[in-house]
Amino acid sequence: MKFLRIVIGCICLTTSINLAAQTVLDKVSVIVDQGVILESEINELIQTVKDSASKNGQSLPSDRALRTQAIERLILDNLQMQTADRMGIRVSDPQLEQTIANIAKNQNSSIDTLRQSIQQAGLDYDNYRESVRKELITGEVRRANVRRRIYITPQEIANLVTLIDEQGNEQAEYRLGHILIGFPPEPTDEDITAARDRAEKVLNLLNTGSEFAKIAIASSSGGKALDGGDMGWLNINSMPTLFAEVVQGKEKDQLVGPIRSGAGFHILKVIDTRGVEVAKLEEINSRHILIKPSIILSEQKAQAMLLEFKAQILEGTATFADLAKQHSEDPGSAARGGDLGWADPNMYVPAFKDGLVKLAKDEISEPIRSTHGWHLMQLIDRRIDDVTDRKKEDKAYQLIFNRKFSEETDAWLREMREEAYIEVLDEGNTD
């Protein structure tokens, strides 16, 4: 009996030590409405940024500044994922695998080779898969919530068409760095003065040789802060209007700002410039039948329904248009027999676009899963864009839409962040 008590005591002691170790290793660091952010998530993102900076020879601010930016990024991600849950947006494993296969294909690689390269870089492949899934979900959430906030007037389109005609083929693209010194939604005079003073200090640091990316990570309130403020390549007509007005004619490495907006004071750096390479775009005319899985309709049954529809169409016992009118759950196209009209395929969600562009004329696809559900698609025709007045208007609309989508996305994220209940439980022990 004495021996048994000793064994039990050792087991209990070992269990207590293991539980204590687990508690130290991971804990809830931030409460975000109905969700939480774990300490391990924060540390993982910080390490990813550090690894990337090390490979690129980029210096970083203090660990405390990195932690603050990482928490802000994770808060926004968490809020978007909670919104996705409420909206019922999901990405199935088949859709995820299809997306990863497309990523590998774009890199002239295979999934196995992609997996090996990820593992050789010291990353976990399962974590990579989930990061791709999260990106697909948050992208769909942004499209669903931001698109309805955008309104474009005919006069805006006409003005831009005129500008494009005047610029001809000499339009420029700018790769911009961005730092936002933000202030509250309803700032006082003191808030504005303090933000302006901080912006002037940041600009002075940059003018005296400080690294832009490091300052952006440490100080910026912008959505690209953790990326060193890098906004990527932007056409002069697709960047925010406020930026377009001040960067035209600026040369590489020039700094611009501070510029005041409703969000705060902006400082820009022209990282690089390049001329626009005008290319003809291929448009496609297509139609589809959408079936959405539900509690009473499984993924397998939805897929099987579309396989049956395809068989009926090929046998001639039913037409695509009639089946779309009877069964498609896309109200916008069902009434037209599934017809989506002429469109740039890039406007569709990735899985839908990738499946559609592989089809030959009149070919019907296998069932394809997207974030909207299961699709049966038919490519009706293709055409190469000729620069007609209508196409110029379409191009102008898309440029304006892209600009407004970027602006409204930032505004939507700020509003969601301001309305959320956020409690940071642990500020960390970094300096």
Image (tube, rainbow, N blue to C red):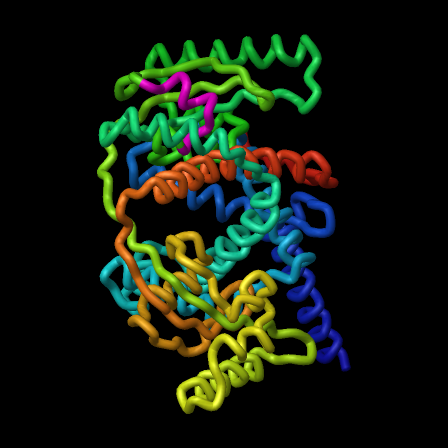
426 to 283, vertically: above or below? above
Q: Who is closer to the viewer here, 287 or 299?
A: 287
What is the x, y in percent for residue 82? 66, 53
- Judge from the rendering whether residue 307 lies leftward or rightward of residue 27; answer left or right: left
* Residue plotted at (40% across, 23% down): 244
Q: Who is closer to the viewer here, 388 or 188?
A: 388
- Magenta residues, as a range? 238-248
Q: Residue 11: say if magenta.
A: no
Majority secondary structure of magenta residues = helix
- Judge from the rendering whether residue 353 lies leftward or rightward of residue 333; answer left or right: left
* Residue plotted at (51% across, 72% down): 289
336 to 423, vertically: above or below? below
Examine the image and state in which quarter residue 146 appears.
top right
* Residue plotted at (55% across, 82% down): 300
What is the x, y in percent for residue 404? 51, 35
Examine the image and state in which quarter residue 116 appears.
bottom left
Q: Residue furthest front?
A: 389
Q: Residue 246: say if magenta.
A: yes
What is the x, y in percent for residue 377? 43, 72
- Say whether residue 143 is visible: yes
What is the x, y in percent for residue 64? 54, 31
112 to 164, vertically: above or below? below
Q: Who is closer to the viewer here, 321 or 307?
A: 321
